[in-house]
Amino acid sequence: MIQNIRTKLTFFFSTLVILWLNYVLAPNNNLCYDVFGYYLYLPFKFIYHDLGITNMDVLNGIVAKYHTTDSLYQILPLANGGAVMKYSMGMSFFYAPFFFIGHGIAFLFNYPMDGFSAPYQYSIFFGGIIYSILGIWLLMKVLLNFFSDKVSAITLALIVFATNVLTHFSMYGQGAMSHNMLFFAYALILWLTIKWHESFKIKFIIGLAIICGLSILSRPSEVVCILIPLLWNVFNFESLKAKIATLIKDKWQILLFVIIIGMIGSFQLIYWKIYTGKFLFYSYGANAGEGFEFLSPYLFQVLFSFRKGWLLYTPIMIFAILGFVKLYKNNRFIFWSLIIYFLLNLYIVSSWSCWWYAQSYSQRSLIASYPIMAIGLGYFIQWVFTQKLLTKCTLGILAVGIVALNLFQSFQYYSGVLSGDSMTKAYYCKTFGKLHASDEDKKLLLVNRFFDGKEVFVNDGSYVKTKEFNIERLQNIRYDSLSEIDKSTSNKLTADSIYSPGIEMSYSEITTKDHAWLRISAWVYPVVDVVENRFCFVTQFTHKGFPYKYTTFDSEKLNLKLNAWNEIKLDYLTPEVRRKEDQLKVYFWLRGKQPLFVGNIRISVYEK
């Protein structure tokens, strides 16, 4: 009889399902949106030789040809005219082998060797599938180190079919996001940690350093992965002393481990130094609306909210967490390593201000931790098999029900019934078990946010005007003569006074709800051509003085009459602010040299 046949059959079945889903759900273009940002390092290093993106025409040409993104949020423009990548470069290392395969295929078969044509897309696509399958295979090997064939097979099946793994290894992110790569990385970290502590061979510490370094380079918060090998076999003071003695005895291996991680990390530091002048650079600075809130993490929302609650949409992880109790009782040698990693990683994930992590099913940011959670789940399943028949049957039926629910909700997500970022309790309950959502149902979702910069407020009767704000000193202006406004310099912009008086208030002054529509208007009186004498009508929020959701009405795009008053109107949907005290600012900004007259900035607030 084949050894561990149940686990191997589970692996092969999982592989077939992943292959089938990727075939059925194959994307039109997988090098888009976030993946586009992760991937940019490769073509701009090896094809365009312009990592500083000094020639924006090349990038704009790629976007126009391949429709990779609606906006270039993936880069951060610099004052020197160039730009740096928003994301760190670790994912490009995972992509690299498949990028070069695609490059070779493009050369051999006469495709455009531009980094984005079909050979590159398909190579990265198949690369993602390979990482997904390797991650599950490594997890199988890890589980068999701790559990029987039967327990390992059930655990592996639940990780694949009772979680959001299938969704994020196929449909969402085209299998090229960080989730399957990091799932693979953590399974490999566990396997190499086990092997090094068994033999202390140098090849295992080298492999461990490389995969830890690449994980951290992919997502700096993954620095917590080092805790797994560092705390392995530490469970009390005596074992801590023994671990320190082991590290001292193998100090040259540990030094090599540190050097390799440092070398991998230095790629990013050198990149930042070359293009920004700083070894440490915050590349997310283009959007102050994102960042860590370590003093006020969103732990409850991450775990339980209807919008993206991990334990609500992936309830099998409740048993994985309970399994840590059994892990503590049965294998303290690895308990503290895994539980400290889990808690610290959950805290970091919950501290990100955009805790819902955009479009996804359940909490995509926690998928990387599933190899660790699988061990807790395995110990829970092992405990179940020691219980009475009634308990085993009850929990078995519950597990089957969770698998069925997860697969059904994954299909709902694929078909658009479950929203990737706008779920509410009312909508979840209304559409539970449904294959279609009506327009009436969809009114229960959170507000639909725009990602192409074109916001249009269509009041369907569910919004009412609740407040109005304006600037008092600009109210009493007659909009029929220029001589009237000459009496006040507060509304005359010049090259020496380029900003108008503006409206400024906190989000909490605008609304107490999760959003509001703002209908903003103002009057402008140009005396010279507005293409030559450019100005912007600016609306933005600021967090600690840094702007986000910055939008402008640019004069060259407006059809304005000269020597006459023109009314400008725009709609603005409030962003998901980081703090309720973040400030809204609305004002004019003169970018030309000739005078411009402005007046009566007004904001009407519409709420549900």
Image (cartoon, helix red, strand yellow):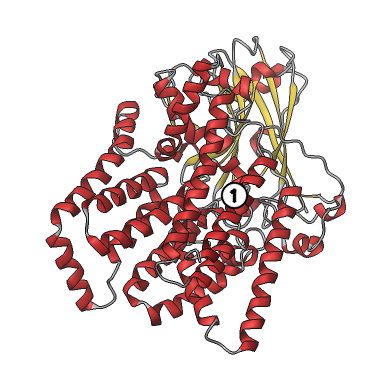
User: Where is residue 418 shown, x and y percent of the image?
Assistant: 73, 54
Residue 205 x/y as whole percent = 25, 53
* Residue 602: percent from left, percent from top: 70, 37
Q: Is residue 12 above or below residue 56?
A: below
Spot the residue most to the front. 1
* Quadrant of residue 310 within the rendered picture: bottom right
Residue sitting at 58 percent across and 63 percent down?
A: 157
Q: Nearer the viewer, residue 529 or 89?
A: 89
Query: What residue is shown at x 58% (from left), y 35% (from top)?
Result: 33
Front residue of this view, candidates 563 and 343: 343
Q: Who is closer to the viewer here, 540 or 233? A: 233
396 is higher (above) or lower (below) than 13:
below
Q: Is residue 171 visible?
A: no
- In the image, taking residue 274 as reference, residue 142 lies left or right, namely right
Q: Secondary structure at mark 1?
A: helix
Q: Amino acid at mark 1?
A: His
For residue 23, above or below residue 99: below
* Location of residue 441 by image quarter: bottom right
148 is higher (above) or lower (below) than 83: below
Residue 105 in the image: state x and y as whole percent: 51, 22
Q: Nearer the viewer, residue 53 or 198?
A: 198
How many C-alpha atoms fall within 10 Å of the one at disc 1: few (<14), some, or many (≥20)?
A: many
* Residue beneath disc 1: 168
